[in-house]
Each structure stands twice: as C-alpha cells, then as structure tokens.
Image (tube, rainbow, N blue to C red):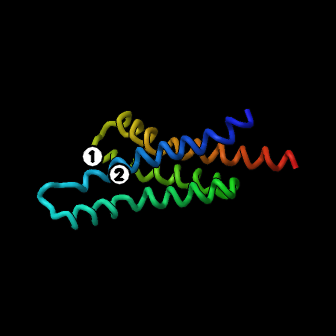
Amino acid sequence: MRTFIHWFPRVLTILAICFVSMFAFDAFDPKLTLGQQILGFLIHMIPSFILLALLLIAWRYKLAGGIAFIILGIAFGIFLYFWNFPMNHNVWMTLGIVALLALPFVISGVLFYLDSIQIQRQK
C-alpha cells in the first residue's frame, strides 16, 4: 500500500498533464505561418508547464504539493463547471467534463497528502 500511495499520484498526474497537453495541438492550423503555429502551441502549453512545475514541487514537498493539487483541482473544477454549463445546459455533460479534467488532480493531491502523512508517522 505504501508503494501505491507513493507512486500512483505521480503517474496519475503525469497522465493528466499529458491529456491536458493534447489540447495544445489545436494551435496548428495550415492557414498560419510556422512561427505563429509554434507561438500558439507554446502559449497553449502554459497550463501544462505550470502543472509540471507543481508536480516537481509536489515530488519533493509532498504536503505542500498535495494541498496545492487539491486547491488547483477544486478551483479548476469550479471554473470548468461555470464555463461549460451556460454553453451546454446539460448538467451531466458538464459534470462529466469536470470529472475528466479536474478530478485526477484532486485525487493526486489527496494521495500526495496521504503520502506525506505516512512519512511523518514513520519518523
């Protein structure tokens, strides 16, 4: 169980960052120049870079990273809900989008937090 709580949040967060990063590929449009496409791609990758930096912090400081991922996941979920619901008018579809994009970060945060508690108990 110790190994699961230690490695699962890292793997889950890496997979979630890769999933979020896939949305940056919509910056490639044949109507744009190569420079515009690369600039657009880098701008779209800013959230992934922030998440990667947060993962590196959480890897070293589990308690701070866990709390940060929990707050980020909840805030991201609230943002997604209020951004998608007016367009969809479908609560279940909106909640599915929120669960798919925000829930992995909340789960990772909880597991980073539990890992830090386990380490404190061993000392």
Q: Are marks 2 and 1 in contact (CB under 8 Å)?
A: yes
Find disc 2 in the rendering and name its residue.
Answer: 83
Give the CA separation, mark 2 to mark 1. Answer: 8 Å
Seen at 39% across and 50% down, the residue is 21
Picture coordinates of residue 84, whole percent (x, y) = 33, 47
Circle number at residue 121: none
- Asked whether 1 or 73 is in front, the reply is 1
Residue farthest to the front, as pictured: 34
* Secondary element at image label 1: helix
Q: Amino acid at mark 2?
A: Trp
* Secondary element at image label 2: helix
Pick the quarter of the image with the N terminus: top right
Picture coordinates of residue 50, whole percent (x, y) = 48, 61
- Figure check: 79 above or below 42: above
Seen at 35% across and 51% down, the residue is 83
Seen at 27% across and 63% down, the residue is 38
Picture coordinates of residue 101, whole percent (x, y) = 44, 44
Q: Amino acid at mark 1?
A: Met
Residue farthest to the right, as pictured: 123
Q: Residues within 10 Å of mark 1 (few under 14, many from 20)?
A: few
Find disc 1 in the rendering and name its residue.
Answer: 87
